[in-house]
Image (tube, coloured by chain):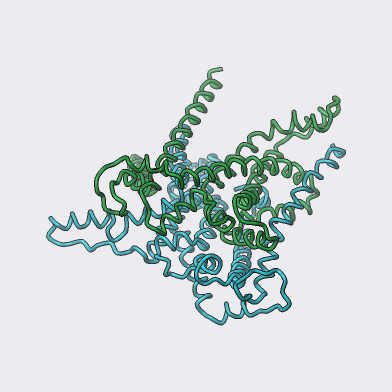
Amino acid sequence: MSSTNKILYKLSYLYIFWMFLFIVLPVFLVFWYSITPLKSGNSLSFYTIKFTLENYKHFFVKSDYIKSLYNSFKLAFFATGFTLIIGYPIALILANMKGKKRNIFLLLMIIPMWTNMLLRTYAWQYIIGRNGLINHWINQLNSFLPFSIPELNIMYTKTAVMLGMTYNYLPFMILPIFSVLVKLDKDLLNAAYDLGANKFWAFIKITFPLSIPGIISGATMVFLPAATSFIIPQYLGGGKDMLIGTIIELQFKGTANNPNFGSTLSIILMIVIFGITTLFSLGSKDESKGESLW
Amino acid sequence: MVKGKIFSYLYTSLILLFLYAPIFVLVIFSFNDSSKKMTWEGFTTKWYIEIMEEDIIQSLIVTLTIALLATIFSTILGSISAIGIYHLKTRYKRVVLKVNSLPILNPDIVTGISLMILFLAISLQFGYTTMLIAHIIFDTPYVILAILPKLKQLNPNILEAALDLGATPSKAVRKIILPQLAPGIITGALIAFTLSVDDFVISYFTTANGVDNLSIWIFNQTRKGITPAANAISSIMLILVITLLTIIFIRLSKDFKKKESH
């Protein structure tokens, strides 16, 4: 056994080299460019004589950028909250379903994730847009009601962006919570009932605390993509709300065209995210955090 | 109690409605006889014929071939690497797994940009190849994470028994370890494929201006004004996926029933 182990671990060498080249090196290069001044013609030349902290200064000095980071996190935070409030009951209901019915509903929940993310975000414009379905129905309703319901006017607002985030990432909150609830030992609940607890208190004292790892997992899987998305703000926010994802994209492929500053933003973003995930993993007692998918 | 059940059904239906609303809209508007997005101007199936046009078929081929190739490469790389990583000493294992999780934890925009910068720094020409490499890079960590739990569940004694009975290490790996890892490998491959088919951000940053995958094509469409052709192709893919999943589901239920009746 130990002799095979002595060989088998060497299989990892290929991947370690791969990771260095394709995971570590790119991050290092981003950092390199973040402390390099913008070259004329916006070329990303690797060779540079002077280093500068100008890009970082620019980030902190111009309050817009900190504001956009804050706004992105705020929106993502609320979206995460909504997915939790909406999704937790679904996870509970699913966990209490039996066999075939549960599998069917799980499938139904996952199928929307198989449509293209851009299209299903864009499609919300059809529904909540000025000339969209909801307003169409409201107007029809208004034509024979004595009072008139106001039109929905949330397109291109932060509310629409939050709706889009909640919509897109809801399954990512439901599934981890579901997978934890499913493994819950029913005997614990039965013991609680035997000892006189009603359903409400059994939930509060037993089910909910035990589901917290799932909640943390789900929250991570919703918050991070939501905070850094640039599609959802672009389609549903009109691209005018400067969220951090939008700004970074503009630096590289859009009008701002400052890849060095974009690199700075990326590094700052990575540091903040690293900080947040470290906080989360401190709150979770699961030792095997890095070793499985959830 | 009954009130609880009614509430559950109502709530679940509401949420399902929420989840499927844009999808219904997508499918319905794929039959819209109008290039202007939101006004319904009659029923037509012409968009399903329109999608046969050059651009969109090209991007579909790119999407599918990249997803397929990336899945194959990342699954092979991931399987070998998972086995290797599993047998590393704990302190090295921890570091390796931390680095491995970077493409997973990093938002796609950061991964996409870092890869774009890497390719620029080594003056690699952007295009199909860079997109493929990028996909393999972000697929492999998921494959590894899907296989590692299966490695944990392996009974080491079986491997030792096989070696004692005279199997060469390579035969032992092939005939004993791999079959037991199969569920993890398949899961990893499925995840990789799913991620690659639907990827937008990373592909967007690592491709050239002409090599589009389906998501990028759609993105360009939304800049110009989306044609229902995009809806049409999305609807077709959706039907394919639903059909595929239903078939798998029925087969699994049949297998389950067979096992029970024995």
Could you tell whether B186 is left or right of A84 in the image?
right
At which x and y percent is residue B49? 37, 40
Task: Identify the residue at horizontal 52%, vertical 71% (top origin).
Answer: A69
**Rendering quarter of residue B260:** top right
Which image quadrant: the N terminus of chain A? top right
Vertical relation: B13 (above or below) A204:
above
User: As rendered, which of A261 and A188 lies closer to the eye?
Assistant: A261
For the point 52% across and 65% down, the residue is A245
**Foreground: A150 or A199?**
A150
Q: Which of the two residues, A61 or A85, is positioned nearer the viewer here?
A: A61
* Above or below, comparing residue B33 to residue B205 in the picture: above
Determine the residue located farthest toward the top in the rendered image.
B262
The cyan chain is: A
Where is residue A150 drawn, in percent x and y?
23, 63
Q: Residue at x 61, y 80 (%)?
A: A57
- In the image, A202 versus A272, the foreground residue is A272
State the image coordinates of residue A2 (x, y, percent, origin top left).
86, 39
Residue B98 relative to residue B21: left or right = right
Q: Residue furthest front?
A: B54
Asked if residue B191 shows in the view, the reply is no
Snapshot quadrant of residue A34: bottom right
Which colour denotes chain B? green
Q: Position of residue A115 (x, y in %)?
A: 45, 46
Lateral position of residue B232 relative to residue A113, left or right: left
